[in-house]
Amino acid sequence: MSTTTAAQPADESAGPSTSAGPGLRRIPKGKRLKGQSAAQFTRDVISAYKTMPIRPICEATGRSYGAIYHLLVTNNVQLRPRGFQPRSSAGPADAS
């Protein structure tokens, strides 16, 4: 039983959460967030969505696409269109 207990903290801290961006933390599978921790998680996800797509947020947090999508929609976040590619600030190349 000690091997199972030792593996659980490693699963929570493992994953791309450190490289995905500040404030995103991995939530163990099946864990429900309540109160202040749910509010903080919501703020973190909304902040992360400003710079990253939903799928990387899902990978970083361990939550499903549907859960992150629902969180954004219920908090009235304006979703980007599918396949959104940010425009470069330099503009189009010289045509001549």
Image: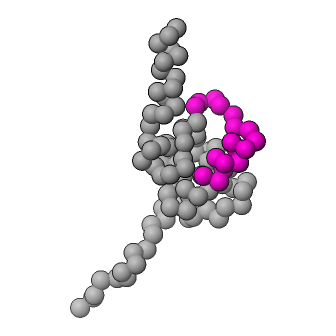
**Residue nearest the viewer, comparing 25 with 61:** 25
Farthest residue, direction top: 1
Taking depth in this image into account, of 27 and 40 the one nearest to the observer is: 40
Where does residue 7 sit, x and y in percent of width and height? Answer: 47, 20
Residue 80 x, y percent position in the rendering: 57, 64
The part of the image, by quadrant, that contains residue 76 is: bottom right
| Residue 33 belongs to magenta span | yes
The vertical placement of 92 against 86, above or below, is: below
Q: Give the range drawn in magenta.
A: 28-44
Horizontal side of residue 9 vs 45, given as left or right: left
Q: Indicate left or right for 44 with 32 as reference.
A: left
Q: Where, by quadrant of the figure, is residue 62 drawn?
A: top right
Task: Please say if 58 is above or below 92.
Answer: above
Is residue 73 highlighted in magenta?
A: no
Q: Which of 93 and 16 is in front in this view?
A: 16
Q: In the rendered image of this protein, does residue 13 appear above or below residue 95?
A: above
- Taking the image as drawn, is residue 24 in sight? yes
Residue found at x 58% / y 31%: 28
